[in-house]
Amino acid sequence: MASYENVRSRISIRLNGGTDQNGKQVIKTASVSKVNGHMSAQDLQAVAAGIAGLLDLPVMGVYKADTNALVE
């Protein structure tokens, strides 16, 4: 029976970088790779909050991206 196996995971924290000279919003991203793919949402939120505390810009959102392999 086929299933998915986590190969790698990373989190991206989107940051509000203000506006540029044309008034357009600037979005910056801080990424962390080699994240445990089986991390719970609550644990992920705690990690992101810790990282966000080290950054100067306000957080707009936190995203987790997984790469999975199809295995039999």
Image (tube, helix red, strand yellow):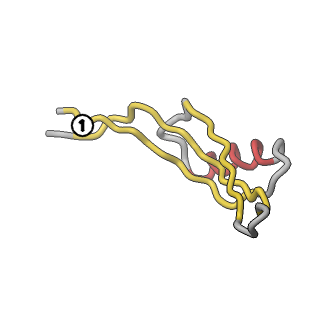
Residue at 44% in and 42% down: 66
Choose between 23 and 28: the one closer to the eye. 23
**Considering only vertical position in the picture, is 44 above or below 24?**
above
Choose between 65 and 41: the one closer to the eye. 65
36 left or right, relative to 19: left
**Considering only vertical position in the picture, is 42 above or below 36?**
below
Q: In which quarter of the image is residue 55?
A: top right
Choose between 56 and 27: the one closer to the eye. 27
Q: How many marks?
A: 1
Quarter in which the C terminus is drawn? top left
**Considering only vertical position in the picture, is 25 above or below 8?**
below
- Of helix, strand and loop, which one carries label 1? strand
Q: Most extreme residue toward the front, as rendered? A: 22
Quarter in which the N terminus is drawn? top left
Q: How crowded is mark 1: few (under 14 residues within 10 Å), some or many (20 or more)?
A: few
Q: Most extreme residue toward the left, as rendered? A: 1
67 left or right, relative to 37: left
Q: Please provide percent x and percent y for residue 14.
A: 66, 53
Residue at 55% in and 47% down: 40
Residue type at mark 1 is Leu
Q: Quadrant of residue 32?
A: top right
Q: Mark 1 points at which residue?
A: 70
**Considering only vertical position in the picture, is 16 above or below 52?**
below
Q: Please provide percent x and percent y for residue 4.
A: 29, 40
Residue at 48% in and 38% down: 37
Residue at 74% in and 49% down: 49
66 left or right, relative to 69: right
Q: Please provide percent x and percent y for residue 34.
A: 54, 30
